[in-house]
């Protein structure tokens, strides 16, 4: 079997401090990509200049007016020439063996719609492994097995280009959980392949995190529309997880009605009752209290999780 042709795509918006490190982690791969496409989504800082200053032949910079992360990813996919598309956020980094492991997964487990590896979380208080499946290969049930661990995040994922022809692109205009929306569409139709090797560094400390800079969405896409009452219970629970997790952020930002709509639509969940109750509670509080309380809760939960509690 011939070596897969892999394009790396990076959506970029105001990541002047991080983008050079991100690109250098790609250029340092033991298995080089065939191209690296960076779509500058209307950055207002020096992000694009940092990309140009590298003068790397593999890197192609595409500029567009600000349209959001999903639109930038779709533009990069349209520009890509590879048969496989490896996703990477502009503030995350790869370990040198990431693309080599992805290529090995493709060769060993052909025909999957999503290839992923494990990752580590970079936080203010250290670097910690994210919990994922222990075995390498095709995941038995993506929706079920994602309930209590990580299988797919954008910076640790590679997708065959033909998959986009069937399921479509990322949901443009969706500013939170667009990746989960895509995983649902892929998981309905394709097998998912995973490697437990921790080959990605996911940053929680980067500038301009999407959740912190959220403004109201204007999009034709929603988890409500994606929901199928006839789907297997594992899929319905995964959609509830994505929608209610997003609703927490919406409530914290003051969008009470959008959060309440998610509660009405996804109140059926049995697996994610805790998240459901958190959204309901947050929605009852004054708006000015919500973000600080959610931030405090998340910080405490992070510390407890690190201690195995």
Image: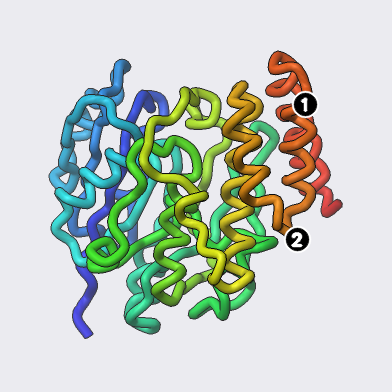
Within 10 angstroms of label 1, few (less than 14), some, or many (20 or more) residues? Answer: few
Q: Quadrant of residue 237?
A: bottom right
As drawn, is 133 to the left or to the right of 82?
right
Q: Is residue 21 visible?
A: no
Q: Pick whichever, 120 or 216, lies toward us.
A: 216
Determine contact: label 1, label 2, CB under 8 Å: no
- For marks 1 and 2, the one nearer the N-term is 2
For the point 54% across and 25% down, which residue is it?
A: 212
Within 10 angstroms of label 2, few (less than 14), some, or many (20 or more) residues? Answer: few
For the point 78% across and 22% down, which residue is it?
A: 285
For the point 59% across and 63% down, which residue is it?
A: 236
| Disc 1 secondary structure class | helix
Q: Which residue is mark 1?
A: 284
Image mark for residue 221: none
In the picture shown, does residue 228 fall above or below 35?
Answer: below
Q: Which residue is mark 2?
A: 270
Q: Position of residue 260 (x, y in %)?
A: 65, 35
Q: Position of residue 5 (x, y in %)?
A: 20, 67
As drawn, is 256 to the left or to the right of 198?
right
For the point 18% across and 62% down, which residue is it?
A: 82
Disc 1 to disc 2, how far (Cα)? 22 Å
Q: Pick whichever, 287 or 29, lies toward us.
A: 287
In the picture shown, does residue 150 fall above or below 177?
Answer: below
Q: Quadrant of residue 106?
A: bottom left
Task: Report the number of discs.
Answer: 2
Q: Position of residue 10 (x, y in %)?
A: 31, 43
Q: Pick whichever, 223 or 211, lies toward us.
A: 223
Q: Quadrant of residue 244?
A: top right
């Amino acid at each position: 079997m011939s070596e897969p042709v892999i394009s790396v795509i990076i959506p970029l918006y105001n990541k002047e401090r991080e983008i050079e490190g991100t690109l250098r982690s790609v250029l340092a791969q033991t298995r080089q990509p065939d191209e690296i496409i960076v779509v500058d989504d209307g950055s207002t800082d020096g992000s694009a200049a940092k990309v140009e200053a590298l003068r790397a032949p593999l890197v192609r910079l595409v500029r567009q007016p600000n349209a959001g992360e999903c639109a930038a990813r779709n533009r990069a996919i349209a520009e890509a020439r590879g048969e496989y598309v490896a996703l990477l956020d502009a503030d995350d980094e790869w370990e040198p063996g990431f693309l080599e492991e992805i290529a090995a997964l493709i060769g060993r487990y052909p025909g999957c719609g999503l290839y992923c590896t494990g990752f580590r979380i970079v936080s203010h208080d250290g670097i910690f492994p994210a919990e994922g499946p222990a075995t390498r290969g095709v995941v038995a049930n993506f929706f079920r097995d994602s309930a209590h661990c990580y299988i797919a995040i954008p910076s640790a994922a590679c997708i065959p280009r033909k998959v986009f022809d069937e399921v479509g692109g990322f949901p443009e205009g969706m500013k939170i959980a667009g990746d989960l929306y895509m995983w649902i569409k892929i998981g309905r139709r394709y097998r998912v392949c995973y490697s437990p090797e921790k080959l990605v560094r996911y940053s929680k400390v980067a500038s301009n995190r999407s959740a912190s800079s959220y403004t109201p969405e204007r999009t034709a896409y929603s988890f409500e529309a994606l929901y199928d009452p006839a789907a297997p219970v594992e899929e319905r629970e995964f959609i509830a997880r994505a929608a209610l997790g997003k609703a927490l952020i919406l409530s914290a930002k003051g969008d009470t009605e959008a959060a309440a709509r998610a509660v009405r639509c996804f109140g059926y969940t049995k697996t994610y009752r805790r998240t459901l109750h958190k959204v309901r509670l947050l929605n009852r509080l004054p708006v000015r209290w919500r973000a600080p309380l959610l931030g405090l809760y998340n910080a405490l939960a992070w510390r407890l999780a690190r201690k195995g509690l």
